[in-house]
Image: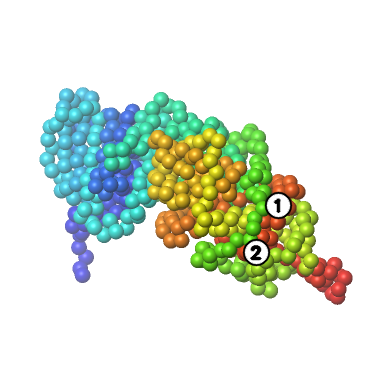
Amino acid sequence: MPIHLLPEEVASQIAAGEVVERPASVVKELIENALDAHARQIVVRVENVGRRAIEVADDGDGIPQSELALAVMRHATSKLQTAEDLFRIATLGFRGEALASIASVSHFSLVSRPAHQSVAARIRVDGGKIGTVEVVGAPVGTLVRVEDLFFNVPARLKFLKRDQTERQQIDALVTRYALAYPQVRFQLFHDGTPIFQTTGNGNQREVLAQLYDVEISRQMLEVEYEDEMVSVSGFTSPVGLTRSNRKEITFFVNGRWVQDTALSTALLQAYHTLLMVGRYPMAILFINLHPEEVDVNVHPTKAEVRFRNPDRVFSAVSRAVRRALMTSNPVPSVVPPSVWQRPLSTPQIDPAWEMSHQAQNLWTTFEQTGETTVSPTPENLPRGTQSPLPSGVLPLLRLVGQVAMAYLVAEGPDGLYLIDQHAAHERVLFERFIQKKGEGIPAQTLLEPTLVHLSPSQARLLEDNVDTLNRLGFHIEPFGPFTFRVSAIPALLSGADPVQAVRAVVEDFEEDETPLQSEVEARLIARICKRTAVKAGQVLSPEEQRALLRDLEACQSPRTCPHGRPTMIHLSADLLERQFGRKGAR
């Protein structure tokens, strides 16, 4: 076809696609506009996770009636005059695209009143078609309502995730901005139900307590660092407080929420050698530097930034967090013997309950910095070892001791066994659960019910799956906003921390886009076992070591954990003799 100019409607929808990816994108742009307008209170109301409506109201400066029609046009902004201004941006918005882009893919209305006007003005935009300005009554500030998002681009609706995922995105965004701007009072409602609110008194720890709970807020370490170019402040978790993913790592650069892999790497570098593999800290860090030292105009949604001197910034982040960690004195925990020190009879396992991905041919070599899984072919086996033996009952083993606070050493009639204490305990717990499932998993009533406080998104996840958890021996019920009352845990976990057990399961829910859709209870059992099993780095007494060996010997599939990872390595007596030159050449 010949070269031609795109119709304005098509061009606007293309521009909207760069800015408005999902309902959370709308919330982000409107919150940032409110903050730029010096709002002291921001109220976000969401209906049907944003598909039906999104409304953001603030008490900021407002837009004069004479500028209202201009405000919803593309490339209209009050924050830039010249191209040079792009390199010293001190506001969150500047492109002049947000309102126009949102209005082009929705039924949009904007009501605003600055303090010097006695009345407010309203303008409507339907799919990019701008209506007339009319006078209305409203308080000082701005209210934007976005209805039927993507009504005129239905293909975009198909790319939205499940309601639970879209809701989590909105919740995460509002709560993070509440942490970054504690002097602003935030309120969030889903379908008329209050989800989250802050006082706006400027106390960040209070907001942390709202987002997590008082205990986590108390444990978080304060980060403070400043040199002649950059300052880093905020909070990071001690080494004993971790998560299974990076979702609780947040960075703000000059008040702007950004996703930057290099910044995350700099943070994790500060925890080098301090965390177990697969565990991540919780952190919210605020990086401030001169606007000319950072380019925020590298991404349509302003989610990424580019630093003029990135090494200096990344070094400051690592140094600030490492300093906070070094001033704390974490004490390693020792697992209570009552968690697992129980005799176990040989169970009868329904094969349908075995994990479908439980491969018997996995080989795992552990290093200090990570773990690598490869197939046990002769070419890649570490020298001096043998591949794991076929699944089956174990011979009686004699305990020798514990190595590196991670592995048990035992002697059998056919040689030496090195046993991964975490993987072994996973297998023991898993088979106990499976054995008890048919009989009904008994619950252990707690002496005193425990309260678990979760973030808004985590609370919704738990609500969606609480019936399944209760069938597995937990007794959990709602107890106020984002709080749950735990009155019992599975008797097989007696002695475990109920709060940590519940949090561990919720963390795994967050990692899965379709949690528990198939093999519901088996997958959940495997998750619980993984999170509650003894960990590498935990010292076990000789009695605890022996009890774990006896329980593992009684398992029907003792040589792998429920996820298919081997629990042990076998070194035959014949191999040891050859390694020491007692039987032929090495």
Give the percent coordinates (x, y) of residue 538.
Answer: 67, 46
Q: Earlier in the sequence, mark 2 or mark 1?
A: 1
- Labels 2, 1: front one: 1
Q: Residue 93 has which mark?
A: none
The quarter of the picture where residue 387 lies is bottom right
Q: Is residue 159 left or right of residue 438?
A: left
Q: Quadrant of the C terminus?
A: bottom right
| Crowd around label 2: few <14 · some 14–19 · many ≥20 (10 Å) | many
The quarter of the picture where residue 494 lies is top right
Q: Quadrant of the N terminus?
A: bottom left
User: Which element type, helix, strand or loop, lies under badge 2?
Assistant: loop
> Front-most of 205 and 98?
205
Give the percent coordinates (x, y) of residue 242.
Answer: 56, 44
Count of marks, rendered view: 2
Rendered residue at 53%/67% (across/down):
351
Q: Residue type at mark 2: give it.
A: Arg
Q: Residue 547 has which mark?
A: 1
The residue that mark 2 highlights is 559
| Crowd around label 1: few <14 · some 14–19 · many ≥20 (10 Å) | some
Q: Is residue 335 above or below residue 568?
A: above
Q: CA distance from mark 2 to mark 1?
A: 17 Å
Q: Is residue 422 left or right of residue 298?
A: right
Residue 422 in view in this figure: yes
